[in-house]
Image (cartoon, rainbow, N blue to C red):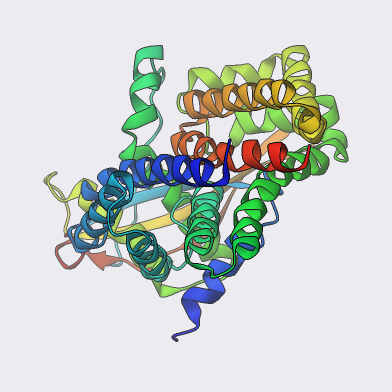
Amino acid sequence: MTFESAVRLTEILLALALAQQSLEHLRGPRRDRLLFAGRIGLCGLVILGLAQPWPLVGLAVLSLAILQRYQGPYNGGSDRMGLLALWCLTLARVLPEPAWRELAFGYLGLQLVLSYVISGWVKVINPDWRSGRALGDVFRFSAYPVSEDLRGWAERPRVLAAMSWAVMGFELAMPLTLISRETLIAGLAAAAAFHLANACLFGLNRFFWTWLAAYPAILWLQARFF
Amino acid sequence: MILRPFALLLPALIPSWNFFDVIAPSPRIEAARLASPDAQPVWREFRPRPQRVSPGEMVRRLVWNPRWNETLFLVTCAERLVDHPTRHSEDEIFRRIAADLVREPGEPWLVFRLVFVSRQGEAIEREVLFEAQPRRLAELAP
């Protein structure tokens, strides 16, 4: 995957993800609608590849207004990944030197790998995660399960321990998948399945689309260095 | 003031990625309508989750999930309100509850409280960590 094709694919996927979120906001309070209608328009220009790089610059500027509006990200981690991808892409388009542009885009790929490794590390050093008890707590009393029936999973300690180790295992193994393109694709497929499960069980649909949007960055970075 | 959005952006550009490192006490928003500001509230959980969500509905929510994402935003506001109280977080919660309730006939005042659920040993405990001052529903509705 060339630098140009990876950047282009990332910006299309990210614009689609941001447009999807923005459409959801149009259903929200009236005073927010202008902000998100503007974002949908800019996403459309990015997808069509018109007036580059200005729609990306516009989205970056608009992201500051949205942060100010909600006094932080609207949906925590998923919005943070969206912001990271957006600002890295914008820099990858506007920086004057090719090496700087590669650095900005490579930073997104690096952070994508770190997002899995660090998440796995902070879990594996916690005895409650190793025993499956922490995941049990997620199902038992956290705000995330989308239905009351799902809370019943808290009563399956063996399944929870197996699920916990599966999650920690794939997160910690992510850097090893960089060995070859095939292993990386397999690792990203496992990661996408993990995000899909989170979207279904915990309603975290934004994570699914924003993380997927950043995948071309790591595919390009892997090809660049391995 | 101008620098504030950049300060909010910084954790996204230098992320910590420590998702679910500990399972912290989890907030529930409970709301009540009152005949007068000093009336005794009868608390009801705001947006209780359904008993069951079908696989088809889960797939649909992949592309259209505004209500749940708004509920998660209110969880963030509730956590902020306890950690670093601001008028913004309180306003957001009040307005979103009001938007849900405004079409239902009922008492003119609205109040909410935040109940944090956690596990202590083997027991699940609930603790009220915040209770707002009542506001007139008519002044909150969008």
Give the residue drawn at x 17%, y 68%.
B139
For the residue pair A40 and B124, the one nearer the viewer reads as: A40
Quadrant of the snapshot with the N terminus of chain A: top right
Relative depth, front residue between A21 and A92: A92
View extreme (bottom): residue: B1
Give above or below for B85 relative to A27: below
Residue A91 position within the rendered picture, expressed as x and y whole percent measured from the top left: 52, 64
Q: Is residue A16 visible?
A: yes
In this rendering, would A205 be left or right of A183?
Answer: left
Q: Residue at x 34, y 45 (%)?
A: A21
Task: Give the camera-side residue of B123 and A59.
Answer: A59
Q: Quadrant of the C terminus of chain A?
A: top right
Expressed as whole percent of the image width and height from the top left, the position of residue B121 reads: 79, 36
Q: Position of residue A151 (x, y in %)?
A: 56, 23
Horizontally, residue B124 falls left or right of residue A165, namely: left
Question: In this rendering, is residue A6 above or below A54?
Answer: above
The mark tally for this picture is: 0
Q: Quadrant of residue A80?
A: bottom right
Residue B27 appears in the picture as rendered: no
Q: Position of residue A153 (x, y in %)?
A: 62, 17
In the rendered view, does B39 fall on the left or right side of B121? Answer: left
Query: In screen coordinates, is A77 left or right of B23?
Result: left
